[in-house]
Image: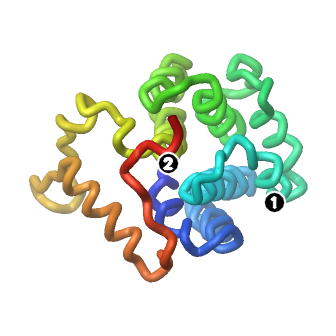
Amino acid sequence: MRASTSAVYFAAAGQEATMDAARRIAALTHGDRAAWEGTAIFHELIRVTFEDIDPLAVLPDVLALVHPDHRGRYTAVLAPDWRPDQASEFNGAVWPCPGSAVWALRTTTSFEGAIRAAIDLGGDTDTVAAVTGGLAGAYYGLEAIPAHWTQPLHVPLPGFDGRVTDLAGLLHLAHRLLRSPSATAGGQVSSRARHP
């Protein structure tokens, strides 16, 4: 759920680097390799979307890069015919969460629609909506996020006594991520909608 930032940071470094970074970052807080693989899938879907490649179309290629011990289960929850009501675990768990996020992207036609679909599932809505938001944000672009959702942003910054940021501050942070040492030429993210 917190991997959108690292996905943006490592996207320009390429497939191997972004998936390796995802696994290492997830391992800091999750001892189960399944979480590492789910984060690697998420990173790679963000990366290909930034290259104007449909992440849903390349899912089979991405799944081929998943550790063999976990590939089958991720293949099942990311299949085109999978639905969240088929999950055998709580939707915030490592398997159904990315499945639910991809389902929300696959079955809707807008950023707002994808987020609403993820939230309407109930359960672990903050986790599923965060993963969905990362994918849908990369897929549709900043301009697809409703202004009535971004204008009231008022985000307290931990460790900065009372300091807050807003959309402009968050965009500044995003641009700093893109100018980071790992972001090379071609790692630019457009604010326009990527897909109609």
Visual colour scheme: rainbow
Q: Is residue 163 visible?
A: yes
Would you identify the image quadrant in which residue 21 lies? bottom right
Q: Residue flagged by tag 2: what amino acid is it?
A: Ala
Upstream in sequence: badge 2 or badge 1: 1
Q: Position of residue 81 (x, y in %)?
A: 80, 24
Q: Residue flagged by tag 1: what amino acid is it?
A: Leu
Q: Secondary structure at mark 2?
A: helix
Compared across the picture, whether 77 is left or right of 10 comes to: right
Above or below, 140 relative to 122:
below
Please identify the residue farthest to the left as the structure is shown.
Answer: 162
Residue at coordinates 71% horizontally, 71% vertically from top-left?
16
Q: Secondary structure at mark 1?
A: loop
Q: Position of residue 95 (x, y in %)?
A: 71, 38
Dot 2 crowding, Cα within 10 Å, few <14, some 14–19, many 20+:
many
Above or below, 64 relative to 23:
above
Q: Position of residue 124 (x, y in %)?
A: 52, 29
Residue at coordinates 15% horizontally, 52% vertically from top-left?
164
Above or below, 28 relative to 133:
below
Compared across the picture, whether 86 is left or right of 135 comes to: right
Residue at coordinates 88% horizontally, 53% vertically from top-left?
69
Mark nearer the viewer, 2 or 1: 2
Please identify the residue farthest to the front as the structure is shown.
Answer: 196
Task: Name the mark on residue 65.
Answer: 1
Compared across the picture, whether 41 is left or right of 64 comes to: left
Q: Which residue is mark 2?
A: 138
Number of marks drawn: 2
Q: Position of residue 56 (x, y in %)?
A: 70, 41
Q: CB atoms at circles 2 and 1 under 8 Å apart?
A: no
Dot 1 crowding, Cα within 10 Å, few <14, some 14–19, many 20+:
some
